[in-house]
Amino acid sequence: AEDLVPGDIVQLGIGDIVAADLRLASGINLSCDEALLTGESSPSAKNADFISDKLATAVGDRVNIAYSSTTVTRGRGAGIVVATGMDTDIGRIALFLYDKKGPSEVLWYSQVDKRASHGVRNARGLKGTPLQNNLHGSKAMAKSNVIVRNIGALEAIGGVTNIYSDKTGTFTQGKMMARRVFFTSGRRLQVHNESNSLNPTTVMAMRAGASKFDIIARDDMKLLTEHSFDSAVKRMSVVYQVGQAAEVICCTKGATEALIPQMFIDNATSKMIVAQADAMASEGLRVLCLAHRTLAQDSVNCISDRKYNEQQQTFADLIGIYDPPRQETSGAIRQCQGAGITVHMLTGDRLKTATKVAREVGILTPYVADSTSSNAVMTASIFDKMTDAQLDELRFLPLVLARASSLMTGDGVNDSPALKGADVGVVMGSNGSDVSKEAANIVLTDNNFASIVSAIREGRRLFDNIRKFLLHLLISNIAQVVLLLVGLAFEDSNGVSVFPLSPLEILFPTS
C-alpha cells in the first residue's frame, strides 16, 4: 500500500483488503464488505459501469468505488487508484481522531533522567525478563521465515501437540499439472515423467493454437458473466457470447459429484464418469469435471441466474491434476512425529486423493499410531455428524479429513474462521489472503511446512527459558524469605527486630 500512487492499477480478488480508494474499471460479481464505513452488515455489490447523476453521493451509493481498508468478499475486478493514505474516505475519518493540540514541550533533563532510569533498570534486571525473552524469540523466528503477529502465540506454539494443516500449497507445491484426461468419446490422454508446471499441457496447447486466448480470439468470444467458485456448490461457470451469430454458451467446471446432477446423462454414463474419477483419485490426482451448455436465444436475459445456467448440461471431459508434494515435507513431518506432535491433513479433495497424498508425505505410515485403523481417514460430512460422546470414544482423531471446508493452517478465505478459533493459527504468507492473515497468529513467509517445525522448536526453547527464570526467581525469593523470618527472631540493642537484608539487597539476586 505504501508504494501506491494515484493512477496505479490494482487487481482485486476474493479475500483481498483494498489498499487505496479505487475507481473500478472492471469487475465480475464483485462485492466488498464496507461495514467499517457504512455500518451495513451485508456486502455491497459493485458495478464498474455505474455513473451517478448527483455530485454529493453517499458513500454507500458509490458502487463504482472500492474503498480503502474494505474487504473483497466475492468476485474479482480491477480499478484505478484515486486516493491514498489520509486522502481516502477511511483516512478522513482517522483525521478526526487525531489530537488537535501540538506536541507538549518536554524538558531536556527529564528525558535524560528517564533514559538513565531505563538503563539502570535494564542493567539491574528489573525489566520483565520473560517479555525480553519473547522479543528475542520473535527475532529468531523471523530469521526462519516465521512472522509472529501475536506475542502470546510464542509460548503457546511450544505446547502444540496436534497440527491440522491444509494440503494444497502447504504439504504440496501448489502447482497444478494436468496428468490424465478422459474425453466423452472414451479416449484417454496421459502425461508421463513431467514435473514442470508450464509443460507440457500449457505449452502443447499454445503450440497447437488451442490455448484459452487463442480460442477466444479465433471464435470472437465475449465474456458476458462469471459465476465464481462457491464451496457450497463446488463449481464455477462462465458465460460467453460466440461470434456474430450471438450464440451464448455456458461452461462449467467443478467436483464430479457436484456436476453429475446438473448434466443431461443416463445412469450408465453417470456410473462410468464416477468410475473414471475414482480411478484418477486413487492415483493422488485432483479430479476436475467439465461440462457445457448452449443457451437459447430467448434466455439471454437469464445469464445472471446461476441455477438456470448450470442445469441440463452436456458432459465434456474429466481432467486429473497432479500437485507434487514439497521435498522437505516428509522430513518435517517425521520431525514432528519424533517430537510427539501428531500431524493431521485436512483438504477439500476426494477421499482417495487425500489418502494417496497422505501416504506420500508420511502422515499415513505403519509407524504412526492408529494410521491403519478405520477412523484414520474420514470425510468431513461423517465427522460433522458425530456427537461429542462418539468423538470421546475415538482413541485418536482422524489423521486425514477429506472434503473439509475450513482448516487450522491454511491460506484461503474459508480458512479464516478456523484460524481465528485455533490455539495457534498459522497462515501461508505469499499466497495467503489478507483476511486469513488478519485472523492468524503466525505468518509463514515461505509457505513451507518445515517452517512450522522451526517455530515449534523456538517456542519450546522460549518456554524452557521462562520456566528456568521463574524457577531461579522462586528459589532466590524463598531463601530471602527464610533469612528474613530468621532475622525477626532477634532484636538489636534498641529492641527492634533485625532485618538482615535491605530492599536493594533483596532486588540484587534477581538481576
Image (cartoon, grey):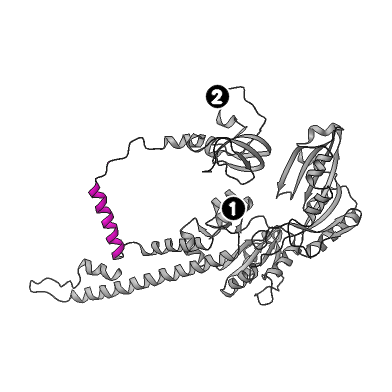
Helix, strand or loop under label 2: loop
> Mark 1 packing: few (<14 Cα in 10 Å), some, or many (20+)?
some
Q: Is residue 31 above or below residue 137?
A: above
Determine the CA span between mark 2 and mark 1.
Answer: 38 Å
Q: Is residue 137 above or below residue 201?
A: below
Query: As rendered, which of 188 and 316 lies closer to the eye?
Result: 188
Side of 141 relative to 471 (left or right): right
Helix, strand or loop under label 1: helix
| Magenta-drawn stretch, dominant element (helix, strand or loop) | helix
Counting from the top left corner in percent of width and height, residue 485 is at: 22, 74
Residue 375 visible in the picture = no
Query: As rendered, which of 42 and 315 lies closer to the eye?
Result: 315
Please state which amino acid type lies under the numbered disc 2.
Ala
The residue that mark 2 highlights is: 56
Counting from the top left corner in percent of width and height, residue 126 is at: 30, 63
> Mark 2 packing: few (<14 Cα in 10 Å), some, or many (20+)?
few
Q: Which residues are magenta?
A: 100-123
Query: As rendered, which of 146 and 478 lies closer to the eye?
Result: 146
Residue most extreme to the front:
207
Residue 385 visible in the picture = yes
The label number, if any, that marks residue 417 in the structure image: 1
Residue 284 placement: quadrant: bottom right
